[in-house]
Image: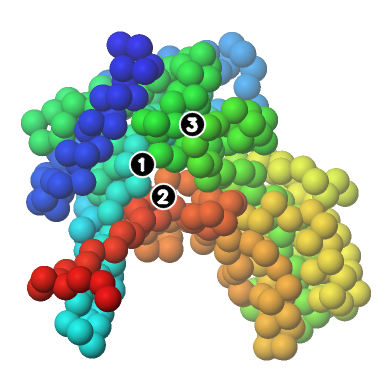
Amino acid sequence: MSILELAKKAKEASLVLQGLSEEMRLTALDAISKAILSRRAEIIIENQKDLIEAQKNKLSSSLVERLTITDEGISALSNMCIEVANQKQVVGMIVENNTRADGLVIQKQRIPLGVIGMIFESRPNVVVDGAALAIKSGNAIILKGGKEAQHSNRVLFEIIKKAIASVMPEGAVNLIETREDVSELLKLNQYIDLMVPRGGSALIQFVKTHATMPVVAHDKGLCHMYVHSDCAVDATKIVLNAKTQRPGVCNALETLILNESYPKNEEILKALKEAGVEIKQEYDTEWLDKKISLKYVKNEREAIEHIKKHSSHHTEAILAKDPKVIEEFLNSLDASCIAINASTRFNDGGELGLGAELGISTSKLHAYGPMGAQEMTTTRFIVIGNGHVRK
């Protein structure tokens, strides 16, 4: 099937998906959840093929970590489908309902966007995340993963396709595999309603440059954490969690900003070094590794100005007690998530109650931060009259 034919099929499917009952969506998600568990061994085998290729190609340890699907990870994918299913219904819901003086009823109804194209790198779990959220939100989706995960992506897609065949229309979930396919897809704005690139800056820029449809970018996470002089929480524990729990993810801490007057600065740095973290002085790099940039400041104003200069608008955090300092931090910075006395690692769809995420949008139109099922919808007006005419 050509990319044009695939896009047309997805568009046809999207019109059917909008009218499906919530029960059918939940049936599809339950089927995917069970199928993933039943084909656990096959997923591991295909993932190992990607990992062997990664070793041959000498990919970085952080990239290998993002590629790896563990037995525990398969269980998490299965559970994620159930968590998404258990989220509140979004498709078809009336979110506003007003009656005019003349009796005309004005409603706002939540509806799917239509067809979403998603291009992502490294993480094969995104195939399942994207499919599950598209089903919940009533959208058709076209997925394109990186070639470094092609075996894993393919087996997960085939599992999903087979699992939903009896309840979802053909073309509801699709997978493409080449850069040439992407280039053609980006031209098809009459069939694709939204393009979502998730990955490195080169990928984001390519999609933004060539897309003929709206783009919601999920760019790098150059996340900062400022430790103020009056910090009253366990800064060492929070910094270690933000940096070392999973260094290769977009919500990991990349730049630590320490107030010169905070009395436990040396304790934090010692703990980082003991954890194998290398201290750097480069402020525009998303390390995705056990490396962290360090900046000393005299006050919160200096910290805010530094973040403004280097922010990727992903996640910024402050550890402080003074409410005026916290308020200034909140009101001065533009980021999809501000964490107060907490780790940057909480900027995640699952942690924020969305069940899963398509990614973390660093754009503002139309979504900012983790995109769950609701962020994959829009609203339309419904006007209900009783013979009304406009005067």
Q: Are marks 3 and 2 in contact (CB under 8 Å)?
A: no
- The disc, 2 or 1, on the residue closer to the chain's N-terminal end is 1
Q: Which residue corresponds to mark 2?
A: 357
Foreground label between 3 and 2: 3
Q: Residues within 10 Å of mark 2 (few under 14, many from 20)?
A: many
Res. 97 image quadrant: bottom left
Placement of the N terminus among the 4 image quadrants: top left
- The furthest residue to the front: 391
Placement of the C terminus among the 4 image quadrants: bottom left
Q: Which residue corresponds to mark 3?
A: 119
Do we see residue 160 in this rendering? Answer: no
Q: Is residue 102 above or below residue 25?
A: below
Under mark 2, the amino acid is Glu
What percent of the width, then of the height, locates residue 136? Answer: 25, 49
Q: Is residue 125 left or right of residue 165?
A: right
Residue at left 49%, top 55%? Answer: 366
Using the image as rendered, state which of residue 207 and residue 294 is in the foreground.
207
* Alpha carbon separation for disc pair 2 and 1: 7 Å
Residue at left 15%, top 35%? Answer: 168
Q: Is residue 104 left or right of residue 217?
A: left
Q: Which residue corresponds to mark 1?
A: 129
* Alpha carbon separation for disc pair 3 and 2: 14 Å
Q: Residues within 10 Å of mark 3 (few under 14, many from 20)?
A: many
Under mark 1, the amino acid is Asp
Say what secondary structure mark 1 lies in: helix
